[in-house]
Image (cartoon, rainbow, N blue to C red):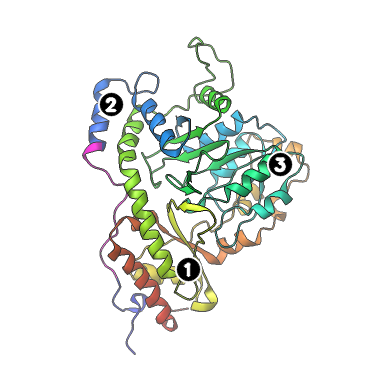
Amino acid sequence: MSKHLAICGGRPVRTNPFPAWPVYGKPEEQALLRVLHTGKWGRIDGEETATFERRFAEYQGAKHGIAVVNGTVSLRLALIAGGIKAGDEVLVPPFTFLATASAVLEANATPVFVDLEPDTYNIDPALLEQAITPRTKAIIPVHLAGLPADMEAIMAIAERHGLLVIEDAAHAHGAEYKGRRVGAIGHVGSFSFQSSKNLCCGEGGIIVTNDDRLYEACKSAHNCGRVPGGAWYDHHHMGGNYRLGEFQAGILNAQLDRLEEQCRRREENGRYLHERLSRVPGIRPQARGKGESRHGYHLFVFRYDESVFGVPRARFLKALEAEGVPASPGYVVPLHRQPMFTNQDFGPYTAPLDTHPGLDYRKVSLPVCERASSSEGAWLYQSVLLGPRSDIDDIATAFEKIYQHRAELPA
């Protein structure tokens, strides 16, 4: 019997590589040399970081921006600036990178995990209100993969209960919810510029806000507790040196010039791929149409139905890779099942244990997230969406081919 699938010895759909990431060239080289020759390599003396803060905040529709060393720090400083303290609870999704929850612990507060919408994998607003207690002080919605969470519903809940909303927009540079760029919809927004992100400089992050008080508090906290007009060695608030350096900011200024065109291309290709894969039985792309006017597409998320293909997710993804399309099972361990939480290994941040007797994350049940992690969720990386339409046709063809010849898939 002839073999059709590449995993079984057939000819793969694609042998050419997809676009490499990051994209860079002469502008980034010139930016690095520009900073080098100024001799002003730190935030305090140079101009690149201040320029980037202003430009990025304006791009996202925010009044203020504070560039910091990474996205984890931006979340933690936002929590501290928002007045979060020992004993407080912060509602977070469990299907995200560790930092969304570990930043809460580093603010000496307690993460409370809330399950997901099954069709988007964003935090479910219908479950948020059920999780609120007298200790709840903040919500951190994650715009997973660049798809904006339901911010209208989340902000309405926050307003009813007097809660701080910190948008984790690490995946969502340029994403829009009902015509507004994310990050500036909540009280504070947090972005990452780590190497894989749609806007990157290796490491880095930024806090954006329209709130003058939160801006001053975040700015002080990221600059060793200093205040405007104060002496260099006057430290008025708890803080540290979390300032972003000039070399990183120089790269970011060059990368920001590329971002809008890349966002448009990801959106166009992402919509097309969504339409193609929606026709493949057993493959359900991350749902759109809940308010997003532009998806950030840091990832192209889809749900896999093992009952249709007859093999586990891991085998399907290997078959996809053999056809020349790299894919990932994503967050295979939900945050509430991570050893740090099941073992309560919070280091010096003991307030959750001191203020919540009997805290036991092993007893938390979040079925949508657990299903996504164990068998259902998967994604493609953002760089595959930066090529021509023919690249997207190849991706769709690979999915269609595997479905058509699914009987060949080895168990």
- Labelled pair 2, 3 in contact (Cβ < 8 Å): no
Residue 142, position in %: x, y? 55, 48
At 28% from the left and 65% from the top, the residue drawn is 390
Q: Is residue 167 something one can see in this rendering? A: yes
Disc 3 target residue = 160
Q: Is residue 250 above or below residue 13?
A: above
Which of 209/396 is in front? Answer: 209
Disc 1 versus disc 2: nearer the observer: 2
The N terminus - image quarter: bottom left
Q: Which image quadrant for residue 53?
A: top left
Determine whether, in the image, residue 144 is placed left or right of residue 37.
Answer: right
Which of 258/41 is in front? Answer: 258
Determine whether, in the image, residue 15 is placed left or right of residue 284.
Answer: left
- Labelled pair 1, 2 in contact (Cβ < 8 Å): no
Disc 2 target residue = 35
At 29% from the left and 53% from the top, the residue drawn is 20
Disc 1 target residue = 314
Query: Magenta span: helix, strand or loop, mainly?
Result: loop
The magenta span reads 14-27
Q: Residues within 10 Å of mark 2 (few under 14, many from 20)?
A: many
As measured in the structure, the alpha-carbon distance from the residue carrying label 2 to the one carrying label 3 is 47 Å
Mark toward the start of the polypeptide (1 vs 2): 2
The secondary structure type at the circle numbered 1 is: helix
- Is residue 377 rendered magenta in the image? no
Q: Is residue 47 above or below residue 381?
A: above
Q: In the rendered structure, which amino acid carries the disc numbered 1?
A: Ala
As measured in the structure, the alpha-carbon distance from the residue carrying label 1 to the one carrying label 2 is 46 Å
- Labelled pair 3, 1 in contact (Cβ < 8 Å): no
Q: Is residue 309 above or below residue 298?
A: below
The secondary structure type at the circle numbered 2 is: helix
